[in-house]
Image (tube, helix red, strand yellow):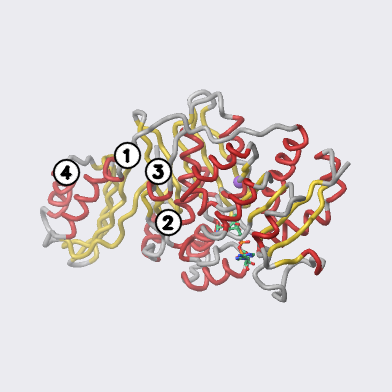
C-alpha cells in the first residue's frame, strides 16, 4: 500500500518530538492506521539551526508553502505557531487536499471559523487536540464523548507555564522571574512568554473550550482576560492563610443560555480537585447535566506530551482518509449571547489594612451592603493602631464587587487594600 506522506511544519519543542515519534513508532503507527506513514518533509526557518531530533538533510526545507502544496502530501502537521504564516499554510494544505493537524490555539481562537470552513469545503479533517491542555484528551471528549449531554460549566487550569510559576511561588517562595526562566527552559512557555503570563494563551484555550462545550463560536477577543503579573507574594500568602491556593483559571459557563468565558487568577480551596494540580500540569473540570462532574488531568505542556496529542490526531485523520471519510467538524449551531464580565457572578476575597477603632468594621460592612453584596466571612487581626480585615463575599455580580472594592479604596478608614482576588470552586 502507498505510504501516507506527512509534512511537518516547524521543528521546535513540539515539532522535534512529533518527528521523533514518527521515526521511532513507524511500525506501530502503520499497524494502527492500516498503512505506513512516511515523513516526507520538515519545514524549518533555518537549515543549520540546532535541533532536538536528527532529520535527514534531504527532508529539510525552508520553503513551507512549497512543501504543503506538493502533490504527494497527504497529512500536514502545523507546529509553527502564531497567526501567519500558519494560517496561509493550513489553508493552502487543505486546498491541496491534505488533512491537517495543528496545535495552534492562538490561530484557532482568532480565526477558527475560516479554517473550519476551508476544511469543510475541502472535505478534509482539521484536528487540534494538542491546542488545549497538551496531552490531555479534552477536545475529543467534548466533541464526541459528551455530544449527547449538556455541558454547563468548564473550569480549567490550561496554562502550564503560569501554573508552574504560581506553584513555585507558593511552595518554594521563588520569585516570579526565576520561576518563569525555569518554565521557559523546560519548553512550557510560548515563544513570547507574555502570552502565558498575561493570560492570552489561556484565553485562546478558553475560547476553544467554550465553542466546543456550548456549540457556538467564541473567539479570544470575547474572553475576559487577566494574567498573573499582578499576583503578589501577599496574595499567595493570604490564600494560604485561608486554606486556599491561587490558580490561573479558564472559566466557561452557560447562564440562562448566555456564555461567560473568562481567564483570571482566583483562590480555590485546597480541598478542590484543581488545587492539587501542581507544576506544569493542567486539569479541566467539566460539569454537565447528565454526567455530573468530570475531571481531565495530565501534562498540559512540553514537547513530548504535546506531540502525543498531535500523533493521536494524526492516526485518526489518517484512518479517516483511508476510509474516505471525515471526523466530527465544527458544531457551532447555537447562536449564544456573551455575558460581559460585569454580569458574571463570582465571589471576592478582599484583604484590607484599616484603622483599629470603633465603627470601622460596620463601615466596611456597609460598603459591601451599599452595593447589595452580602458578606460570607470576616476575619480581623489587630496590630496596634491598625488592623487587618479579610472579607469574603457571597456570590454577586462582578460589577457590584468591583464597585465595592473601588469604594473601599476611597474610604478614609481604609489605609490600604492589600489583596483582592476572586474565589472559585468554594460551593
Ligand atoms: N510547547 C508546548 O508545550 C505546546 C503545547 C501545546 C501547544 N503548543 C503549540 O504548538 C505550536 C508550536 O509550539 P512550540 O513550543 O514547538 O514552539 P517553538 O517556538 O519551540 O517551535 C516553533 C518552530 O517553528 C519554526 N518556524 C517559525 N516560522 C517558521 C516558518 N515560516 N517555517 C518553518 N518553521 C518556522 C521556529 O523556528 C521554531 O523552531 C504553537 O502553536 C504552540 O502554541 C505548544
Ligand atoms: N505555553 C503553553 C503551552 C501549552 O499550550 C503552556 O504553558 O501551557
Ligand atoms: Na489536549
Residue picked out by circle 3: 261
Q: Which mark is residue 102?
A: none
Give the side of residue 263 with respect to residue 282, left or right. left
Closer to us: 7 or 422 = 7
- Quadrant where the C terminus is found in the figure: top left
Disc 4 or disc 1, which is closer to the eye?
1
- Is residue 290 positioned above or below 164 on the image? above
Q: CA distance from mark 3 to mark 2?
A: 27 Å
Residue picked out by circle 4: 371
Chain-order first, disc 4 or disc 2: 2
Q: In x, y percent, where is residue 387?
A: 22, 61
Task: Write the residue at 48% across / 72% down.
Answer: 177
Q: CA distance from mark 3 to mark 4?
A: 24 Å
Whether residue 275 is visible here, answered yes or no, is: no
Closer to us: 259 or 270 = 259
- Give the class, few, some or many, for how many residues have Cα within 10 Å of label 4's Cα (few <14, many ≥20): some
Q: CA distance from mark 2 to mark 1?
A: 31 Å
Amino acid at each position: 500500500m502507498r505510504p501516507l506522506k506527512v509534512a511537518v511544519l516547524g521543528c521546535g519543542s513540539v515539532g522535534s518530538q512529533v518527528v521523533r515519534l514518527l521515526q521511532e513508532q513507524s511500525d506501530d503507527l502503520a499497524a494502527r492506521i492500516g498503512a505506513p506513514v512516511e515523513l516526507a518533509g520538515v519545514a524549518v526557518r533555518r537549515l543549520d539551526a540546532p535541533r532536538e531530533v536528527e532529520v535527514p538533510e534531504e527532508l529539510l526545507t525552508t520553503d513551507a508553502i512549497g512543501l504543503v502544496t506538493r502533490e504527494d502530501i497527504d497529512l500536514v502537521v502545523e507546529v509553527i505557531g502564531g497567526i501567519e504564516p500558519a494560517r496561509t499554510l493550513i489553508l493552502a494544505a487543505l486546498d491541496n487536499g491534505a488533512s491537517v493537524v495543528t496545535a495552534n490555539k492562538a490561530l484557532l481562537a482568532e480565526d477558527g471559523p475560516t479554517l473550519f470552513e476551508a476544511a469543510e469545503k475541502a472535505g478534509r479533517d482539521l484536528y487540534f487536540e494538542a491546542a488545549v491542555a497538551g496531552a490531555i484528551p479534552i477536545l475529543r471528549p467534548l466533541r464526541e464523548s459528551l455530544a449527547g449531554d449538556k455541558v454547563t460549566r468548564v473550569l480549567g487550569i490550561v496554562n502550564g507555564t503560569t501554573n508552574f510559576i504560581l506553584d513555585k511561588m507558593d511552595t518554594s517562595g521563588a520569585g516570579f522571574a526565576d520561576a518563569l526562566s525555569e518554565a521557559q527552559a523546560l519548553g512550557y512557555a510560548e515563544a513570547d512568554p507574555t502570552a502565558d503570563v498575561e493570560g492570552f494563551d489561556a484565553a485562546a484555550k478558553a475560547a476553544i473550550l467554550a465553542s466546543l462545550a456550548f456549540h457556538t463560536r467564541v473567539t479570544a477577543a470575547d474572553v475576559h482576560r487577566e494574567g498573573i503579573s499582578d499576583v503578589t507574594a501577599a496574595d499567595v500568602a493570604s490564600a494560604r492563610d485561608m486554606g486556599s491556593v491561587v490558580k490561573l483559571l479558564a472559566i466557561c459557563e452557560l447562564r440562562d443560555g448566555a456564555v461567560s468565558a473568562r481567564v483570571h487568577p482566583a483562590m480555590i480551596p485546597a480541598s478542590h480537585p484543581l488545587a492539587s494540580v501542581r507544576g506544569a500540569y493542567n486539569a479541566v473540570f467539566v460539569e454537565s447535566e447528565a454526567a455530573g462532574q468530570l475531571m481531565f488531568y495530565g501534562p498540559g505542556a512540553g514537547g513530548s506530551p504535546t506531540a502525543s496529542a498531535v500523533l493521536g490526531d494524526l492516526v485518526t485523520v489518517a484512518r479517516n482518509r483511508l476510509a474516505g471519510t471525515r471526523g466530527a467538524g465544527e458544531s457551532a449551531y447555537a447562536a449564544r449571547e456573551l455575558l460581559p464580565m460585569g454580569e458574571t457572578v463570582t465571589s471576592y476575597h478582599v484583604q484590607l489594612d484599616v484603622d483599629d477603632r470603633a465603627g470601622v468594621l460596620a463601615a466596611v460592612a456597609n460598603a459591601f451592603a451599599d452595593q447589595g453584596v452580602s458578606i460570607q466571612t470576616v476575619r480581623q487581626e489587630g496590630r496596634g493602631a491598625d488592623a487587618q480585615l479579610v472579607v469574603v463575599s457571597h456570590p454577586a455580580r462582578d460589577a457590584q464587587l468591583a464597585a465595592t472594592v473601588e469604594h473601599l479604596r476611597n474610604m478614609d478608614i481604609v489605609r490600604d487594600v492589600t489583596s483582592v482576588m476572586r474565589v472559585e470552586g468554594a460551593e
